[in-house]
Amino acid sequence: MGKNVLVISGSPKKDGNTALLVGWFAEGVRSGGSTAEIIRAADLEHKAVGCTSCRVCQKSPVYRCVIKDEVSVCVARFAEADVIVMASPLYFYGASSQLKAMMDRMFSLYKWDNAANTMTTPLKGKTFVFLGSGYEDAGFDIFEKPFQLTARYTGMVYASLVVKNAGVSGEIVKLSGVREQAFELGKKIAG
Ligand SMILES: Cc1cc2nc3c(=O)[nH]c(=O)nc-3n(C[C@H](O)[C@H](O)[C@H](O)COP(=O)(O)O)c2cc1C
């Protein structure tokens, strides 16, 4: 049976390197009969930037951020996906703020009981994929670390494709083999 792959594209550029990577990855996913839905974080309505740490989600039985905007609706849908993909350009050695603002809302997808030292989440057992690119070749370990560690903490299977020396927006097409790598990763993940 096909997988339900939800891709969060974190670049503000509609036709840049992240969009290309995401597109190639999605082609690979779809080649095997799975579905890939791409949501651009920059297009979503934000009533608050990131998580406000109000903690109301921790007192609720549902895995849902209480801020009433499109980011909350999108993040709640992570629980229904088999695979969650986050894609970002490297911005000053980290993910784009558009993606980070959404990632912080993932707080609502966990319930912590600090007294019992337990954490539960509907994300456990899913697959988490990171697709990244940057102009240079410095800082890629710290760029990827938050995604790797989030997957480990959450109990998700992790995979990534991180492209160094990708050039400015759109120039990633000049790198040989990247399109194939992104396609193959999508195919493998959905297989
Ligand atoms: C605000 C901003 C900050 C950036 N910071 C870095 C950086 O720290 N290191 C780097 O290698 N590239 C940096 N870049 C280049 C982009 O990461 C790179 O060109 C990326 O592949 C662009 O992806 P996009 O076309 O999807 O936006 C930066 C670009 C912008 C616009």
Image (spheres, rainbow, N blue to C red):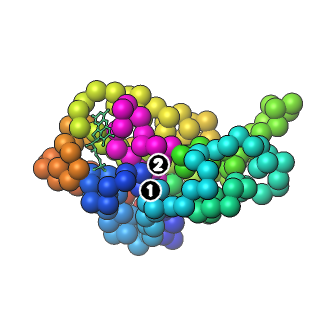
Quarter where residue 29 is shown: bottom left
* Residue at point 82%, 55% (across, down): 61
Instruction: Determine the CA span between mark 2 and mark 1.
Output: 6 Å
Q: Secondary structure at mark 1?
A: helix
Left or right of 103, for residue 179: left
Q: Which residue ends up furthest to the right in the rendered image?
A: 115
For label 1, the crowd category at 10 Å Cα-Cα, with few meaning under 14, some 14 to 19 and many 20 or more, is many
Q: Residue at x 84, y 48 (%)?
A: 59
Q: Which residue is mark 1?
A: 42
Q: 99 and 179: which one is in front?
A: 99
Picture coordinates of residue 123, whole percent (x, y): 63, 51
**Residue located 32% across and 60% down the image:** 14
**Location of residue 1 with respect to 188 vertically, above or below:** below
- Range of the magenta residues? 85-100
* Magenta run includes residue 18: no
Of 7 and 191, nearer the camera is: 7
| Above or below 3: residue 18 | above
In-front residue for pair 185/12: 12
Chain-order first, disc 2 or disc 1? 1
Q: Amino acid at mark 2?
A: Gln
Which of the numbered marks, if any, corresponds to residue 98?
2
